[in-house]
Amino acid sequence: MGSLFRSEEVCLAQLFLQSASAYSCISELGERGLLEFRDLNPKVSPFQRRFVGEVRRCEEMEKTFTFLQQELRAAGRLPAPCPESPRAPAAREALRVQEQSEQLAQELREVSRSRSSLRDRLRDLRQHLHVLREGQRFTSLPVGPGVPAGLGREPILDPSLHHHLDRKINFVAGVIHPWRVTAFERLLWRACRGYLVASFVEMPEPMEDPATGESITWVIFLISYWGEQIGQKIRKISNCFHCQVYGYPESEASRTEAITRLHGQIQELSTLEETEKYLAEVLDKVAQVLPTWRVQVQKMKAIYLVLNQCSFDVTKKCLIAEVWCPVRDLTQVQDALRQGSVSGSCFVQRVPTTESPPTLIRTNKFTAGFQSIVDAYGVASYQEVNPAPYAIITFPFIFAIMFGDVGHGLLMFLFALWMVLYEDSPRLRQGTNEIWLTFFEGRYLILLMGAFSIYTGFIYNECFSKATAIFPSAWSVATMANHSSWSSAYLATHPSLTLDPNVTGVFQGPYPFGIDPIWSLATNHLNFLNSFKMKMSVVLGIVHMGFGVMLGVFNHVHFQQRHRLVLEFLPEMIFLLALFGYLVFLIFYKWIKFSAADSRVAPSILIHFIDMFLFTSNAENLPLYPGQVPVQMVLVVLALASVPVLLLGTPLYQWCRQRAPRTVRPRAHDFAEIFMHQAIHTIEYCLGCVSNTASYLRLWALSLAHAQLSEVLWSMVMRNGFVGLSYVGGVVLVPVFAAFAVLTVAILLVMEGLSAFLHALRLHWVEFQNKFYVGAGYKLCPFAFAPDTWE
Amino acid sequence: MTAHSFALPLVLFSAFCRLVGIAAPWFVPKGPNRGVIITMLVTTAVCCYLFWLIAILAQANPLFGPQLKNETIWYVRFLWE
């Protein structure tokens, strides 16, 4: 069956690696991903290990790479993912990578610095230019009709006009952040008490704020004042408000000269363009090589971390590594070592061990989902029977019993089919939403769940809560009506009447596939369905549990514990079958033997079952078959007799074996432990049989809930759309259907689906698996370079 | 309305399930997944057959009949039959 039936054989092996070729051997092994390395230096701290220097070097390189990555991201480029995974570099190549990366980082830093200083200077000059230009508007003479209309008033601040004044007008010009303008203005007025005139105008184009980098429309201000002290106050206030102050020459001529000078300086800064181009080139180079380098250095670091786990043998000058290796892959490991080492001097040797090896179960994309839900409860112990191959079918089947509806199953199936057919599309694979990824990982699971739900939906005869009459119904209303003379008048006075199967011709044989559609029209359909579903749950539960007990046989045989077949498996089976197998028999017997003719006196199975345990009998409850009471007594005695066998059998057997002379003698307190363990197992099994059988009744409960919910949704939402028979009714149907669809998907598919999934999972994990599964193992985690961790 | 036999569906469905569960496993191509596919086929056949069997046996000898509203009876009586 391959390795899905039980985990593969895994052995402990030792690798002998020459110091020179150790690195390449481990690199080769890492590419193939076969072995799990064990740490041979557990007590050594990470700082004292052999290859700590190399690991540190790798980490420094990674720091440089992070810096380069940040620069790339700041410039708005996304590094392309690495196309194929390069191998880990040899020592010389690693050195070259380190030098090149540091050089690139250095270049990048320098270029960025010069670029930012150039840009600062340019911004400064342009601001100065704007200040001067805008200030012209307030201080220059009107030059005729070219004056903008908004500034219609006389330029009262022209110094040439006020020469007759005794005071000299001075100017403070600068730029201020637009949010601070009102506060600035107010403070100026309060401080200088009107001995100044301040004007503010917005800069025509927005510029970058050096601190935050966002572009803001600055406000240029021009303050003209009298007096030196006022001037000092104004300058101090401007300082407080972090304004950029520029010198404002008084005369017109010097201003124009300053403007032309600034223009010239701005032209000179054309080197800024060249700097930008050079920066782009450097970034291009970085973007090209960075992904490969990252992968290489990550692999190198992983290899050194593994080498740190090996122990160094001084005499033979080689490194010894202890690995868990699947036996099937030993030849591949030899191959890898031969390829990696120069002189073929590295080899692998199997080592016997008493420790329990890790579990390895190879899965493909289909079985991986089912194996993961089994592993979520507990990884299988080494080489014990794996419940996954059976869970592939029983899990969706048990889900479908609780979910059974053709319409809902079809929707689920189609959704999963879409996911499966497009599973290779990168858009689906690279989703980041965790909930979506969970659904996507389980796409085969959902596919099977949908398919089985369609089947159980046909058996329950429910399609969006409506029954379909694929075959004509077996119940004849006409015969009953003729027999009891149900005329229209009679029907008008009796709101509900029952069809009696005792009348010939009313019931004409069982519906060939599933539940008869007449029951969906009946008002007492729950009476019938409850009885059917409860018995179905109990029967399926006991069959499932019996199957679980039988799987334990494989474990007993494989682990050479045949005594457990007689001392554990046999009593367990007798207990289960004598009590609950008999219950299944009673259920089937009553279905076959009792019909409507004796419906008045039909015995109750439940009462019989209870009486069986209590060794009493009820006079009103007729026996199902002659000789029932002695048969039941025998069965109960048999079941009770198997309990002490289960309790004491294995411990006594092991104690007897211990008394015979053997090399390995378990100590006395081991025996007490064995006995305790067996006692717990017995109690758990016997009580568990009863409680787990009842636990399977959740199959009935959830399928009832699902059926009722979908019926409510139909009769209270969708039916209202069909009430109006006019054209308006047709239009009303559209939003009604929309509501019905949304509620179906949200409540019935998502909520009920998750609920049924959870309960099916619980039934598998607890009721099925505690009959045979231990689940105390640990997974084999091979050393491999995982391709999806590069980000 | 119509008489249904009990034996015919039993024979037919049992035959179908036996086809899926016993005959088909011989035709599964050899490969690494042969064991898994055979297990799946057999489990499917057993589960589906058991479920169908329970459904048909529960209806084979009904102890009581459906209780219908008078409207339903009138509709089925005069419009269906």
Image (cartoon, rainbow, N blue to C red):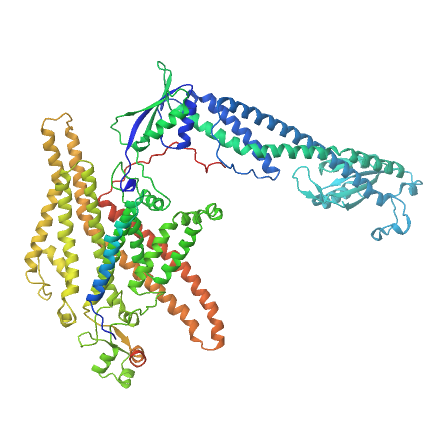
* Left or right, A283 with reference to A441: right
Relative side of A464 to A427, left or right: left
Quarter where residue A356 is shown: top left
Viewer-proximal residue among A646 and A565? A565
Q: Indicate the quadrant containing the N terminus of chain A: top left, top right, bottom left or bottom right.
A: top left
Q: Residue A538 falls in which quadrant of the image?
A: bottom left
Residue A201 shows in this picture: yes
Which x, y percent locates residue A116? 68, 33
Q: Nearer the viewer, residue B1 or A32?
A: A32
Above or below — where is A563 with respect to A598?
A: above
Q: Residue pushed farthest right?
A: A164
Residue at 71%, 36% (x, y): give it.
Answer: A240
**Residue at the top extreme of this rendering:** A315
Give the x, y percent position of residue A620.
Answer: 10, 66
Closer to the camera, A503 or B15? B15
Q: Position of residue A791 (x, y in %)?
A: 50, 37
Q: Residue A160: x, y in percent?
A: 92, 41
In the image, taking residue A279 as reference, residue A501 lies left or right, namely left
Residue B15 falls left or right of residue A574? right
